[in-house]
């Protein structure tokens, strides 16, 4: 198969809009030898010290707007089940968001076809989108755009547009299967300040800058950032009435380190070139907490945040339920890494130069 970027690019743009050109964001590098069953997500470790509430924005890498890895089949199946069970708590869109929904879907399909040419193809004539990993087809000209996204991409997308009367950006649509303590139904229709109301220090330190950032953000400068938490197990979608939510309110003396997982929500933010909608998308990735033992500097950083992080930020992050087991382990691993010479004994904890990764992470891929 000829996998030159020019040919792959033309496969999805002969009769349809060229969103790479429209947005000014270049197409991703094709991966003709991609094997989803062997693919690993990059080991994001977005830990910072000093730890305070900021947007912590970085320029988005065009190759990684959407990132597939070995849990792909499992996650898509889980997302389909969640939508079947919970409907508009998972997927919903307000009137007036139709163009943005369709535009987002077309951009997602175009990206997948270019990045993963052997896994995804679009028949421009019929509008049939072929998913060779799952053996499924979607007609992007006839089906609900957000359902097409949920059936093919294990990422969440929240869509905002400026209110015609106030100019405030508000959430007008979304597909979200990765939310903890909230859902699309609790956020849709709300402006940014209401959506972020539970976030510590948001009103005082971030509200004005976020509104200004959204109003001025150009389509050709998407950004990325990461958030993290420590969980018991791997809860993808967790609501307050779920029995598992109770684990966040108690310290189980029998909790095993092997049952604690780092959850990273790797996020991107970009403006759609036609509708002007600002799209926030994120993917939940889980890593065993015990992995930190072999990741230089990470135990020191996480230990510092857990022990000295600002009280209201740590309460919002909700790590208390695992700290009785995590803190002693991190203390042990920090000392162990110093004895091995991985970390200087007198190292002053700070955000790593290779943030959001750890030194030597490339060897794990």
Image: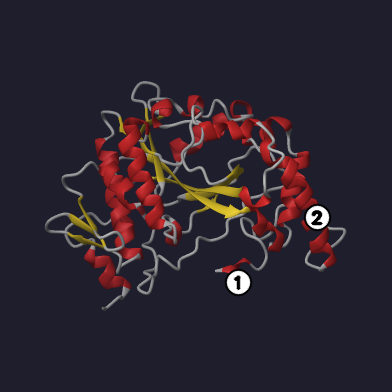
Left/right placement of residue 74 relative to residue 15 reads right
Q: Position of residue 199 (x, y in %)?
A: 58, 30
Residue at left offset 35%, top offset 21%: 165
User: Residue 363 got which mark?
Assistant: 1
**Sequence order check: which comes first, mark 2 or mark 1?**
2
- Which element type, helix, strand or loop, lies under badge 2? helix
The extreme right residue here reads 346
User: Residue 349 got which mark?
Assistant: none
On screen, residue 12 above or below 319: below
The figure's colour scheme reads: secondary structure
On screen, residue 250 above or below 333: above
Tell me how far mark 2 sits from mark 1, CA to CA.
Answer: 24 Å
| Quadrant in the picture for residue 359 | bottom right
Viewer-proximal residue among 258 and 106: 258
Q: Which residue is mark 2?
A: 332
On screen, residue 337 above or below 203: below
Viewer-proximal residue among 245 and 58: 245
| Quadrant in the picture for residue 345 | bottom right
Q: Position of residue 94 (x, y in %)?
A: 30, 29
- Which element type, helix, strand or loop, lies under badge 1? helix
Left/right placement of residue 324 relative to residue 181 reads right
Q: Quadrant of the C terminus?
A: bottom right
Residue 156 in view: yes
Labels 2, 1: front one? 2
Left/right placement of residue 176 relative to residue 364 reads left
Residue at left offset 76%, top offset 53%: 300
The extreme bottom residue here reads 1
User: Label 1: few (<14), some or many (≥20) within 10 Å?
Assistant: few
User: Label 2: few (<14), some or many (≥20) within 10 Å?
Assistant: few
Left/right placement of residue 357 relative to residue 210 reads right
| Quadrant in the picture for residue 85 | top left
């Amino acid at each position: 198969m000829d996998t030159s970027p020019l040919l792959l690019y033309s496969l999805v743009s002969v009769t349809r809009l060229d969103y790479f050109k429209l947005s000014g964001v270049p197409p991703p590098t094709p991966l003709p030898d991609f094997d989803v069953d062997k693919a690993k997500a990059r080991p994001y470790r977005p830990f910072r010290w000093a730890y305070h509430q900021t947007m912590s924005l970085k320029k988005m890498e065009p190759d990684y707007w959407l990132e597939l890895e070995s849990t792909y089949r499992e996650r898509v199946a889980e997302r389909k089940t969640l939508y079947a069970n919970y409907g508009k708590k998972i997927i919903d869109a307000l009137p007036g968001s139709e163009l943005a929904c369709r535009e987002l879907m077309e951009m997602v399909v175009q990206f997948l076809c270019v990045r993963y040419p052997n896994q995804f193809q679009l028949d421009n004539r019929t509008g049939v989108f072929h998913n060779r990993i799952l053996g499924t087809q979607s007609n992007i000209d006839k089906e609900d755009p957000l359902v097409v996204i949920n059936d093919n991409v294990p990422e969440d997308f929240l869509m905002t547009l400026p209110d015609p009367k106030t100019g405030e950006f508000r959430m007008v649509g979304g597909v979200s299967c990765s939310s903890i303590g909230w859902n699309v139904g609790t956020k849709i229709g709300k402006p940014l300040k209401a959506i972020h109301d539970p976030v510590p220090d948001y009103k005082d330190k971030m509200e004005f800058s976020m509104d200004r950032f959204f109003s001025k953000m150009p389509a050709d400068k998407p950004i990325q950032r990461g958030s993290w938490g420590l969980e018991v197990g791997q809860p993808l979608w967790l609501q307050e009435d779920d029995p598992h939510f109770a684990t966040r309110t108690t310290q189980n003396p029998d909790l095993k380190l092997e049952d604690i997982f780092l959850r990273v929500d790797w996020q991107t933010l970009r403006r759609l070139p036609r509708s002007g909608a600002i799209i926030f998308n994120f993917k939940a990735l889980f890593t065993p907490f015990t992995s930190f033992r072999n990741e230089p500097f990470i135990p020191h950083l996480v230990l510092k945040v857990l022990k000295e992080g600002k009280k209201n930020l740590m309460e919002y992050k909700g790590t208390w339920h695992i700290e009785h087991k995590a803190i002693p382990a991190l203390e042990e691993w920090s000392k162990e890494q110093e004895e091995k010479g991985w970390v200087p004994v007198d190292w002053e904890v700070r955000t790593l130069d290779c943030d959001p990764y750890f030194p030597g992470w490339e060897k794990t891929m």
